[in-house]
Image (spheres, rainbow, N blue to C red):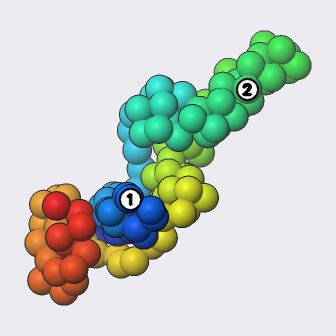
Protein backbone atom coordinates (compact mmCIF):
# COMPACT_ATOMS: atom_id res chain seq x y z
CA UNK A 1 0.00 0.00 0.00
CA UNK A 2 1.20 3.47 -0.82
CA UNK A 3 0.64 6.56 1.26
CA UNK A 4 -0.84 9.71 -0.28
CA UNK A 5 -1.36 13.15 1.22
CA UNK A 6 -4.22 15.41 0.20
CA UNK A 7 -3.15 19.04 -0.19
CA UNK A 8 -5.89 21.70 -0.33
CA UNK A 9 -5.65 25.26 -1.58
CA UNK A 10 -8.28 27.38 0.18
CA UNK A 11 -10.37 29.76 -1.91
CA UNK A 12 -8.80 33.16 -2.51
CA UNK A 13 -10.57 35.91 -4.36
CA UNK A 14 -12.03 34.49 -7.56
CA UNK A 15 -10.05 31.23 -7.30
CA UNK A 16 -12.11 28.28 -6.11
CA UNK A 17 -10.65 25.81 -3.61
CA UNK A 18 -8.67 22.94 -5.10
CA UNK A 19 -7.21 19.68 -3.84
CA UNK A 20 -4.40 17.52 -5.15
CA UNK A 21 -3.38 14.01 -4.08
CA UNK A 22 0.41 13.56 -3.73
CA UNK A 23 2.08 10.17 -3.38
CA UNK A 24 4.68 9.80 -0.67
CA UNK A 25 7.86 7.80 -1.17
CA UNK A 26 10.83 7.55 -3.51
CA UNK A 27 10.56 9.50 -6.79
CA UNK A 28 12.68 7.72 -9.39
CA UNK A 29 12.61 10.56 -11.93
CA UNK A 30 13.55 13.06 -9.25
CA UNK A 31 16.58 10.88 -8.56
CA UNK A 32 17.52 10.65 -12.26
CA UNK A 33 16.87 14.28 -13.25
CA UNK A 34 16.06 16.38 -10.16
CA UNK A 35 16.07 19.80 -11.83
CA UNK A 36 13.71 18.67 -14.59
CA UNK A 37 11.46 16.92 -12.05
CA UNK A 38 11.16 20.09 -9.99
CA UNK A 39 10.49 22.19 -13.11
CA UNK A 40 7.83 19.73 -14.30
CA UNK A 41 6.08 20.02 -10.92
CA UNK A 42 6.38 23.84 -10.93
CA UNK A 43 8.78 23.99 -7.98
CA UNK A 44 10.97 26.62 -9.62
CA UNK A 45 12.89 27.74 -6.54
CA UNK A 46 13.75 24.14 -5.65
CA UNK A 47 14.95 23.56 -9.22
CA UNK A 48 17.13 26.66 -8.97
CA UNK A 49 18.55 25.63 -5.61
CA UNK A 50 19.34 22.15 -6.88
CA UNK A 51 21.03 23.52 -9.97
CA UNK A 52 23.00 26.04 -7.90
CA UNK A 53 24.13 23.30 -5.50
CA UNK A 54 25.31 21.11 -8.37
CA UNK A 55 27.15 23.98 -10.06
CA UNK A 56 28.76 25.02 -6.77
CA UNK A 57 29.89 21.46 -6.07
CA UNK A 58 31.37 21.22 -9.55
CA UNK A 59 33.20 24.52 -9.20
CA UNK A 60 34.47 24.26 -5.64
CA UNK A 61 35.22 20.59 -5.04
CA UNK A 62 37.85 18.28 -6.49
CA UNK A 63 36.58 16.12 -9.37
CA UNK A 64 36.85 12.90 -7.35
CA UNK A 65 34.41 14.21 -4.75
CA UNK A 66 31.94 15.80 -7.17
CA UNK A 67 30.60 12.50 -8.50
CA UNK A 68 30.04 11.00 -5.06
CA UNK A 69 28.43 14.12 -3.62
CA UNK A 70 26.24 14.63 -6.70
CA UNK A 71 25.03 11.05 -6.40
CA UNK A 72 24.35 11.61 -2.70
CA UNK A 73 22.40 14.81 -3.44
CA UNK A 74 20.37 13.06 -6.12
CA UNK A 75 19.65 10.14 -3.81
CA UNK A 76 18.50 12.55 -1.09
CA UNK A 77 16.28 14.37 -3.59
CA UNK A 78 14.86 11.06 -4.83
CA UNK A 79 13.75 10.17 -1.31
CA UNK A 80 12.57 13.67 -0.32
CA UNK A 81 11.28 15.19 -3.58
CA UNK A 82 7.63 14.54 -2.88
CA UNK A 83 7.92 15.90 0.65
CA UNK A 84 9.72 18.96 -0.75
CA UNK A 85 6.87 19.42 -3.25
CA UNK A 86 4.33 19.30 -0.41
CA UNK A 87 6.46 21.80 1.52
CA UNK A 88 6.60 24.05 -1.56
CA UNK A 89 2.80 23.91 -1.87
CA UNK A 90 2.57 24.79 1.84
CA UNK A 91 4.62 27.92 1.20
CA UNK A 92 2.12 28.87 -1.49
CA UNK A 93 -0.87 28.57 0.87
CA UNK A 94 -1.84 24.92 0.46
CA UNK A 95 -2.36 22.80 3.57
CA UNK A 96 -2.38 19.09 4.26
CA UNK A 97 -5.95 17.99 4.94
CA UNK A 98 -5.79 14.20 4.89
CA UNK A 99 -3.56 11.17 4.54
CA UNK A 100 -4.94 8.17 2.63
CA UNK A 101 -3.59 4.80 1.55
CA UNK A 102 -4.13 2.82 -1.61
CA UNK A 103 -2.47 0.56 -4.13
CA UNK A 104 -2.70 3.33 -6.74
CA UNK A 105 -3.74 6.97 -6.99
CA UNK A 106 -7.21 5.86 -8.09
CA UNK A 107 -7.61 3.57 -5.06
CA UNK A 108 -6.43 6.39 -2.79
CA UNK A 109 -8.99 8.69 -4.40
CA UNK A 110 -11.75 6.14 -3.74
CA UNK A 111 -10.60 5.85 -0.12
CA UNK A 112 -10.72 9.63 0.15
CA UNK A 113 -14.16 9.74 -1.47
CA UNK A 114 -15.54 7.25 1.03
CA UNK A 115 -14.18 9.13 4.04
CA UNK A 116 -14.11 12.77 2.93
CA UNK A 117 -16.39 13.31 -0.10
CA UNK A 118 -15.95 17.07 0.22
CA UNK A 119 -12.21 16.75 -0.45
CA UNK A 120 -12.78 14.20 -3.21
CA UNK A 121 -14.96 16.71 -5.07
CA UNK A 122 -12.16 19.27 -4.90
CA UNK A 123 -9.59 16.74 -6.16
CA UNK A 124 -11.73 15.47 -9.04
Left or right of 38: which side holds 114?
left
Question: Residue shown at 74%/19% (left/top)?
Answer: 55
Q: Which quarter of the rendering shows the N terminus?
A: bottom left
Q: Who is closer to the viewer here, 31 or 92?
A: 92
Could you tell me residue 96's position as x and y percent?
45, 72
Question: Residue shown at 38%/59% (left/top)?
Answer: 14
Q: Who is closer to the viewer here, 120 or 26?
A: 120
- Residue at label 2? 52
When the figure is inspected, residue 1 is found, relative to residue 56, above or below; the finding is below
Q: Which quarter of the rendering shows the C terminus?
A: bottom left
Q: Who is closer to the viewer here, 1 or 56?
A: 56
Could you tell me residue 38's position as x and y percent?
50, 36
SS at badge 1: loop
- Pointers 2 and 1 in contact (C-beta within 8 Å): no
When the figure is inspected, residue 33 is found, relative to residue 9, above or below; the finding is above
Q: Who is closer to the viewer here, 22 or 59?
A: 22
Could you tell me residue 7's position as x and y percent?
39, 66
When the figure is inspected, residue 18 is found, relative to residue 101, above or below; the finding is above
Determine the CA span between mark 2 and mark 1.
36 Å
When the figure is inspected, residue 75 is found, relative to residue 19, above or below; the finding is above
Left or right of 35: which side holds 99?
left
First-in-chain label (2 vs 1): 1
- Residue at label 1? 14
Could you tell me residue 115's position as x and y percent?
19, 86
Amino acid sequence: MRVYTVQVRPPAGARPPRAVILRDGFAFWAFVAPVLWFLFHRCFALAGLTLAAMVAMGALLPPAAVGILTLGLQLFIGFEARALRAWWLGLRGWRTEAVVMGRSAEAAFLTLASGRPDLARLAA
